Structure formats: structure tokens, C-alpha cells
Amino acid sequence: MSDPLTWSPIRLGRWFGTTVRVHIFLILFVGSELLMALLATRAEDGVRRLPATACWLGLLLAALAIHELAHALAAYLLDTEQEEVHLWPLGNLVTPSAPARGGEHMLVALAGPAVSGALFLGIALGLEFLARAHFVWNPFGNGPVAGVTDSGAPTLAGGSLARPLSRIWTIGWFGYVNYLLFLANLLPALPFDGGRMLRGYLSSHGLVSSRDSIYAPWTARATAAILFLTGLARLLIKWRADGLTLIMLALLIEWLVRSESRILEDGGYFEDGVFGYDFSEGYTSLESSAAKVRPYRESAIRRWRRRRSELRRQRRMAREAAEERRMDEILDKLHRQGRSALTDEENRFLVRVSTRYRNRSKTQD
């Protein structure tokens, strides 16, 4: 559990064969939002905000459950194995543990945004034509209206926001959180569904057959750069706290790109299936009977310690090789010209290295 991406203490069981867990990020997000609502500037605001905050957080959890159920159902219907789901505020905090293969993985990744998109579009149209209320199309939420800030509340015909906890307010907020899930998961980078869709598309077109493919990581890095610059602009120019959220998302994307690159460098993926065979192209009898090999997930701390140990070993070997060459040169000079021809530095080097070799021999004995 040393890798923060796997800190998912709550297990929600298996949904259509997919294990679903609640990530610590979602727990911290819900807890912090409830705490901020409770500790509002004025006591009466805190009493008024807490039920509304608890309500829209419940709507968010429902939207997340529907989103991930769509993924799990699609994987079940297509008979495609889906990795564990780690629920966080924007869907599944997927970690790079195996390369995507084929169009089926793209369809599984597409199922979640498709359901979220259908929900928010249906709610937006229903609010507009049935209730004469306006859906919140700004992904950053409503600005202050008459001194009241309520990000996902629809705007009524008179220009005011829907009353908190009313029927229109609840429906509008449910559409708004689905809208955010839809937009976020279109980003072509992990941990979002867009990143998995991109990998599935590239795999189905034979563009990720080797670990040297640069399409997915560079697309993710470009996405992270855009999010970072947008967040910086909103933070420094408009003084909006959501700019910090965008910056944190950019850093998360970059972190996942680097993690995926390290896994590929360490040989963590079986690129062509078990034992080098691509079973997705045939050998169905072997595919049904062979055990599925999952790569070992090494934590970030263990990778760092292993690389540091390897660098120390390489530096030690290079130093010893240089000393051996220097020792051969001094011994050759001693043999040809005698001890008197050696300089003080060469005599000190000869004594130091000879002493080290003697001590090493005693230790080995």
C-alpha cells in the first residue's frame, strides 16, 4: 500500500465481475466539502449549506456509481476483463498496469462517458422545455447570483437560482455532476476514460505494438500542459480556486505518465501476451485454458530505492575499473623504471589501493 494510487480502503464488492473500491481521494473530498460547509463564514450559512452540500455529494456518488456500472456492464457484455475500479471524484483512478488491446477496450472505456452524457443531455432538455429552467453549461459552475453562489443550481425563468433541495435544484445538480463527469472523462489522458479510449483506438490500429510508442504519453503531456496553463490563468488572473484544481489534475496526469514510462522501462508489461504470444489474434483454445499473468506492481518508493541502489553500484564499478587501470599503469612503470621513478601521488595511490585489496581479502576469508 505504499503507492498512493492504490490507497482504496473501502471495497464495494464486484459489479458485473469488476471489483470496485473507494479511493482515499474520494473519502477526503467528501469529508473536506462537508467540513467546509459546516465551518461556513456565518453560522446560519453553515446550517443552510450543510444539507445542500450533503445532497449534491450524494448525487455525485450516485452519478459515479452509474458511470462505473456502465463500464462494468459493457465489459461483461463484451466478455472483456476490466481491471479494478478505484472510485475518486472524477470516476476511476486507473493506474497503468497493462496496455490496452483492441477496440473492445475502447468500447468499454466509452460506455461511462456515453451514459453520463445521455443523462446530462436528457436533464438539460427536460429543464429547458418542461420547467423553463436553464441548465448550467459552464463547467466551472454558476457565478454569484444575487449574492448567492450555488455551482450546479439551474437558473429559473426570472433569473434567480433554484431553491436548494427543491425538486428542480436536485435534478439540475444531478445533471451538472454528470456533465462534469462527461467532460472530465473526455480528456485524452489517464486516469480519465479518454486516455483509455485513445489507447484502445491506437491498439486497434496497430499503433501501440511496441513500448516505444509516443502517441499516448505525449497526448497526455499536452493535455496536462493545457490544464496547467488554464489553471494558472484562472488562479492568477481571476483569483478562482478552481484554478488550483486544474493544476492538481495536470500534476496527476504527469505523474501517471511518468509511472507508465517507468513500468515500460522496467519491463512491467507483457507486450505480446503470455510468453510472447498475442492470444488476441488467435489460439483461442490456449487463451481459454492459459492462466492470465498479471504484471508485478512495484511501488514508486521501491522503484526509487532500486534505481538509487543501481546508480550507486554503477558508480562503484566505474571507480573500481578506473583504479584498476591506474594500478596497472603504476605497476608497469614500477617494473620498467623502479620504485624511485614513482611520484609521491603514485606511491600514496599504490599504498591505498593495496591496503584496500588486503582488507577485502581478509573480509572474504
Image (tube, rainbow, N blue to C red):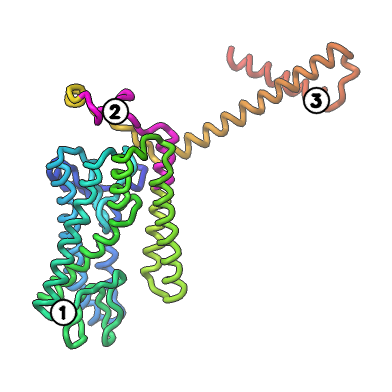
Which amino acid type corresponds to the residue marked 1 in the rendered image? Ala
Give the labeled residue for mark 2. Answer: 278
The image shows residue 94 at horizontal and vertical percentages of: 29, 47
Q: Residues within 10 Å of mark 3 (few under 14, many from 20)?
A: few
**Cβ–Cβ below 8 Å for labels 1 and 3?**
no
If you read the primary sequence from the N terminus, does the residue marked by circle 2 or circle 1 appear first?
1
The answer to whether residue 201 is seen in the rendering is: yes
**Location of residue 240 by image quarter:** bottom left
Depth order, front residue of 312/180: 180
Magenta-colored span: 257-283
**Residue at screen point 45% across, 70% down:** 233
- Foreground label between 2 and 1: 2
Give the labeled residue for mark 3. Answer: 348
Which amino acid type corresponds to the residue marked 3 in the rendered image? Arg
Depth order, front residue of 212/257: 212
Depth order, front residue of 175/165: 175
**Residue at screen point 14% across, 69% down:** 123
The image shows residue 111 at horizontal and vertical percentages of: 19, 51
